[in-house]
Image (cartoon, rainbow, N blue to C red):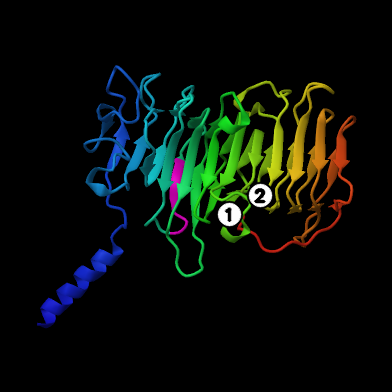
Amino acid sequence: MRIIALLTAVALLATLAAPAYAGDTFEWTGADGGNTNWDDADNWSGAAGYPGDGVGGVKDDIAKIPGNLADNKYPVVFNESDITIKRLEIVGKVGEDDLVFLSDDASHKLRIDTDGIAEGKVALKLTSAHAIMKLQKKSELWFTSDDQVGDKVFDFVIDSNGTIEFAGSGQDADMPKLVVADGKTVTAVGQGRLVGTWQGRITGEVVGSPDAADVFVLGRNATIWGSFTIDATFYHHGDVHTSPDYLDLDPDVPGKITLTCNPKGGTGNWWVDGGTGSANLSEVIVDANLAGDGNVEVSNFGVLRVNRHMSVGTIDRGVNSGNLFLNRGAKVRVAKGILFEIDRFLFPDCPGTR
């Protein structure tokens, strides 16, 4: 009886220790010579079907995209319904966009549902500097989870040394989106880049709701380049640039970053760079309260528009921080009645800098 009881206990512990996801692992092969569609099972190996097909009633699949395929063989998210998977890994290949979201009048949504993944575990991984995920018109990349222990908010990770590019053209309502859902926090670690070559949106599921704060954190080595609207709660510890020149584009191309809705903060620097002349300016528009202790530098064709309280100062870390640099021709425009400080500010705890 003791042996049976012991075996039963061991079996129970093994069950509890097992991964919570029960989906399949797929590797992209691009074997179907006629297309590069994500939802074509002939383009994947490792299991029947394709990642996110919901076979067996689960959407816990892991998708892996290698970096050794022939050119023009990498996947395009082309499907009539949303795709939901557990985790996505992209190795990256020089000169290739490794995952492209189709750009048309239909919405193409890839949801990474982190239910059952331990706190802090990687939900999206771009291994190399060559890895590029391109979101285009009406495309959406979601991070969502119902997991919660008591009042604890889980922190899920984008581990990237590559690029998530927001590209395309059209109306603002069509801009590609990165969505943090369910009141969770997503942290970008590594040396990766978010690049808005057109206009991207970093947003929460419930924009402007302080009761369900969806938080995006930019780690100290990660960067943002180009044009974005950021309305999620946002903490940045890396650098934020309005110029999109990290993709070898013209460094003088102007960009616009609008900070709106929920509060912003962090220890990173703001660069209002790019722009070609007085009629083609780069802008950072502060339409949400912003607190931080990084530097702010405005280029000769840049404008910092302060429409909400903004404070950039010094936290006692033994370093000088919170400086404002204005190049000749740069402009700072502060709305009437707005607090604008550059010498000091003490703000509450925010997510770690990793």
Label 1, secondary structure: give it: loop
In the rendered view, does 67 fall on the left or right side of 215?
left
Q: Which mark is residue 354?
A: 1
Q: Could you tell me if residue 242 is visible in this image?
A: no
- Are the two marked residues, 2 and 1, in contact with CB atoms closer than 8 angstroms? yes
Q: Eyeballing the image, is 319 above or below 24? A: below
Quarter of the N terminus within the rendering: bottom left
Of labels 2 and 1, earlier in sequence is 2
Q: Eyeballing the image, is 283 above or below 231? A: above
Location of mark 2 (residue):
237
What range is drawn magenta here?
A: 119-125
Quarter of the C terminus within the rendering: bottom right
- The tally of labels here is 2
Residue at point 48%, 25% (across, down): 105
Q: CA distance from mark 2 to mark 1?
A: 9 Å
Residue at point 39%, 38% (across, down): 82
Place of residue 296 in the rendered image (x, y in percent of width and height, measured from the top left): 79, 43
Residue at point 60%, 49% (across, down): 207
Q: Quadrant of residue 68?
A: top left
Q: Amino acid at mark 2?
A: His
Residue at the far left in the pictured view:
1
Place of residue 263 in the rendered image (x, y in percent of width and height, measured from the top left): 69, 53
Between residue 210 and residue 326, name the one nearer to us: 210
